[in-house]
Structures are given as structure tokens and as C-alpha cells.
Amino acid sequence: MGIIESPFLWIGILSGGIFFLFIWNVFLTHSLSRIKKHSEIFYSGVKANNLETSIYEHMQRTKGLEKDLKELADFSNKVYILAGKSTHKIGLIRFNPFKDVGGDQSFALALLDREKTGVVISSLYTREGTRIYAKPVHKNLSLEGYSFTEEEKEAIERASVKKIEGFSQASS
């Protein structure tokens, strides 16, 4: 009796094949159950014949969301530009312009926007009364015909160095 005719060899080969097929069957069953689970999540609430309609509706919603997002971005840029034109840089200096009057009752107040343009208001207190002056500021400079006092320059400088909090540079 040769090796090819040995019944134990054939039984061993068939047993190994059956064991391999059993393991393969377990693997395929596990894979199939995972696919079913994922497909149930994917197709939840959707019938198979309505899948195309469902995908189309999702595409339409996505386009609507893109449009809304663009509108929000445009609105945000408009708000940023408007906020830059508002007064949010403030510098205040109190001083005593005359030695015979006690206390720092005079002041210079600079009110500037993001472009460092605005107004500087000065108040000079004397025994006879208080005088108030306002001068325009354009990009940290005085306009022709107006000159700044040292206190006004200091108030403008204090306002200029303050950073705008909560805003990042947007494309204008």
C-alpha cells in the first residue's frame, strides 16, 4: 500500500480542508454581519428604491448649507468692516496745565477707529472756567491748520498702541 492509497492520509487532508472551510465560513459570517450592521446605519429610514431620492435631497441640503455659509461669511466681513469704523481705541491723559491750579483736572481724550482716525478732545481747567477743544485725527496725524499739544499727542499715542481684541484681519 502506497502513500496515495493510504486512507488515513486522505482523511487527514479532507479533515484539514473541512477545518479550513469552517474557519473561512466563520470569517465570512463575521464580515457579513459587520456589513449588515453598517448598511443598517447607512440606510436607516430609507427604502432601497428611494436611495437615489435620498442622495439627491442630501445634495440639495448641502448646496443650501453652502449658500448659507457664504451669506454668513459675507455678513461677518460687513460686520468686521463696520466695527473697524467704530471708536474702539481710546487714550486718556489727565494733566495740570497751570502750576497755580491744584490737581490734574484737565485732560486730553483721543477716540480713534482701527485706521487711527477720529478725534482728540481736550479740556483745560482754569479758575475762570473750563475750555473744551476738539481736533480731528487722521491716521495718527493732525489735519492742516491744527496742531496737537504734547498731552494730545500722548493721548493719541496711548490710543494707537491698543490692539483691537476679538477681531482678526479680514479681506476688505
Image (spheres, helix red, strand yellow):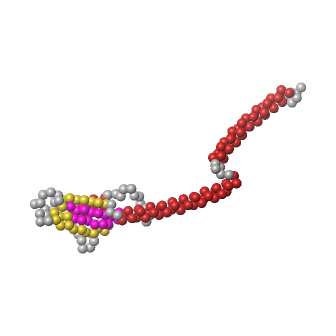
Q: Residue at x 52, y 61 (%)?
A: 68
Q: Which segment is the magenta one?
A: 107-122
Residue 124 placement, left or right of 44: left
Work out which residue is located at the far left of the displayed protein and give it.
100
* Residue 130 place in picture, x, y as percent: 16, 65
- To which quarter of the image does residue 139 belong? bottom left
Residue 103 placement, left or right of 10: left
150 or 5, nearer to the observer: 150
* Residue 13 place in picture, x, y as percent: 80, 31
Judge whether residue 117 is colored magenta. Answer: yes
Q: Residue at x 47, y 63 (%)?
A: 74
Judge whether residue 121 is colored magenta. Answer: yes
161 or 93, nearer to the observer: 93
* Residue 59 place in picture, x, y as percent: 61, 58
Q: Is residue 124 visible?
A: yes
Residue 13 placement, left or right of 103: right
**Most common secondary structure along the magenta stretch:** strand
Residue 81 placement, left or right of 17: left
Q: Residue at x 89, y 26 (%)?
A: 1
Q: Is residue 81 above or below residue 27?
A: below
* Residue 134 place in picture, x, y as percent: 24, 68
| Image quarter in which the C terminus is found | bottom left
Q: Is residue 150 visible?
A: no
